[in-house]
Amino acid sequence: MSRLKSIGNWFEQRLQIGGAIREAMTHPVPRKSASWWYVFGSAALTLFILQVFSGIMLALTYVPSAAEAWNSLQFLNHGVTLGWFLRAVHGWGSNFMVAVVLIHLCQVFLFGAYKFPRELTWVVGVFLLLMTLGMAFTGQVLRFDQDAYWGLGIGASITSRIPFIGGYAVHMLLGGPIIAGATLSRFFALHVFVIPGLLIALVSVHLLLVLKLGINEWPMPGRLVRRATYLKEYEELTHKDGVPFVPTAIWKDMFFSAAIIVSVMACAWFFGPFGPSGYPDPTIVQTIPKPDFFFLWLYAMLALLPPSMETPALLIGPVIVIGFLILLPFLSGEGEKSWKRRPIAVVTLLLVAVALGTFTQLATYSPWSPVMNAWSGDPVPVEYLNGRSPLERQGALVFQVKQCRNCHSIGGSGGKRGPALDKVATNLTRDQFVRQVIQGGGNMPAYGKNLNPAEVTALVSFLETLRPSNQPAARDASQAAITSEEPPVAPPNAR
Amino acid sequence: MSDQDTNAISRRDLFAKIGILLNGLAVVILATPVIGYLMSPILAGDRSQYKRWIALGEIDEFPEGQTRLARFKNPITGVADGETDQIPCWVRRMQGEQFQVFAVNCAHLGCPVRWFAQSGLFMCPCHGGVYYQDGSRASGPPPRGLFEYHYKVEGGKLLIEAGQLPTLSTTAALRARKNGCQG
């Protein structure tokens, strides 16, 4: 024991950092801040360390070349002992890290932690969030499969919408004229050197600021932040009602971090690694690219925005959102911290959460996309053919062969791009069917050039059968007036 | 120390300032080639090096009235591109030597559109863009029709001018934009 101590002293004599470490560890925190609500920051840091560690492990096998990356991922999955597990830990760790960083953001937002004097801590945190998302996107590219390839195409297409310099920006993003080896190399450099380096630097600043300024106190309704008095009040709070960070507060951080690591490993073990999906060969056009979970909301937004709003939303939207986040502590650096007295903050957060959640949920089944193989894969339900005339059955065939099914479902299967057609005959008359099929409209292509009159007749005959037997077919009101024997009723204001 | 010394710059201050200046100069000199290196994708593209005429094959490989997937090797390649330098395109032969050659990339966000011969439509799997057989927009979010390559027929072969990923600002037919015709 004494030998251990003498070794320690030997180092301390030279490094002279023991005092600073002791001070940092035992710095007082407000008693109520030693709470389970304050564990997300340290959990994010733990996950970052896990990502660095597992990332280095993957780099031992991964080959950052467009020709070899996919094969090296397959080799990691199948050829290296527990390579699949390390890939899974890195992939799930990424998802957990984005989630925990987002929760951390929500918590400090609701607890008013961005107010004076912690403005800079918040601003640095905003950049840490952006870099975490940057790591998630570049990591998805390194998993160089079809999703990654076409994801880069989407990135390039968004970049190309920048006015004036769009073309140059695309070539800079791709490192050349097309998505190829140079593209993967630069995303590798970003994912492995540039962004992690910046992350380490900014995390250090973020932590230093937490130590220098102290952890945010538990917000009490009515206890307002004022620049003139806050520092003194915080000083009193930590000294009168403070507890040392170690050991009173830190055990909760440690418990939670351990639980997070175990959760990542459990997900990795039971659900396995992500992909890689198909081989990144652009000539394989039979693919349905989809982004990773945390970018699904964007995927949905890009499908649902009106085309005219898309470019402004893509280019100005991020500037507004990031600008708002950065300016927030300068716009409301003082005043009420408690979420109980900040209804607009709470409603804003809920709105954003509900919107992102809804978009993400929609993107899991992407109703805006045609189902590419519905026409050849989903049979027409038997009850839609039983007792039908030959012409109507021929119409069902036209319905399938002309890929109507890719966008319109019947019997619960098929695309959701257009309306389901199970009851369509209760809404449209024969004439309306013919017009809709030939001229299209309402986001439906015109089929006039691709259907001959016989096919239209058959198709419309089939469509006319699509209604429940207990509901009448749609009928043209004016038709009745023309064919009826009685003279038409004069309009009330006619002379 | 005399009075005039307080205004004069001391010898070591002067050297410190010269030292800063020298290092600043070194950084500028070093940065120039580094920036040139980083900008190389733009500089190469600006000199129109990205576009070449590439043969897609004999025109007889493309039956009249049909649209078929063709592939070509991108004229600009790197050392480790794997299959990514194989670029697909949709070739529509109307009749004789009349062609339309479309990029597979949807004009919306670049996903690969698929050709459905029966309905005569290109459909995009990502956000639901649909195009008619002549490449014009039929429905969905795309802001324009499919990107079209310039083509010519020489010695019975179909050639297209290609070489870069087509997007809204790096269209398949880059030069055509300058001539004012729809690319």
Image (cartoon, helix red, strand yellow):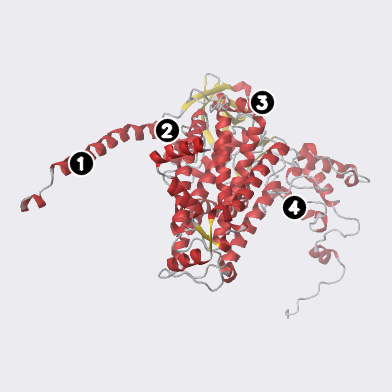
Circle on res. B59? none
Q: Amino acid at mark 3?
A: Thr
Identified at 50% across, 48% down, the residue is: A128
How far apart are the two marked residues, 2 and 3, measured between alpha carbons? 40 Å
How far apart are the two marked residues, 2 and 4, measured between alpha carbons? 46 Å
- Residue nearer the viewer, B158 or A149: A149
Name the element at disc 4: loop
Mark 2 Cα-neighbour bin, 10 Å: few <14, some 14–19, many ≥20: many
Give the x, y percent position of residue A291.
62, 42
Q: Which residue is the site of mark 1?
A: B16
Residue lying furthest front? A2
Name the element at disc 3: loop
Q: Amino acid at mark 1?
A: Ala
Give the x, y percent position of residue A93.
62, 41
Discs 2, 3: same chain: no
- Residue nearer the viewer, A430 or A420: A420
Q: Is residue A405 above or below residue A187?
A: below
Mark 4 Cα-neighbour bin, 10 Å: few <14, some 14–19, many ≥20: few
Discs 4, 3: same chain: yes
Q: Quadrant of residue B33?
A: top left
Q: Which residue is the site of mark 2?
A: B41
Q: Which residue is the site of mark 4?
A: A419
Q: Which residue is the site of mark 3?
A: A81
Identified at 47% across, 43% down, the residue is: A200
Give the x, y percent position of residue A39.
59, 53
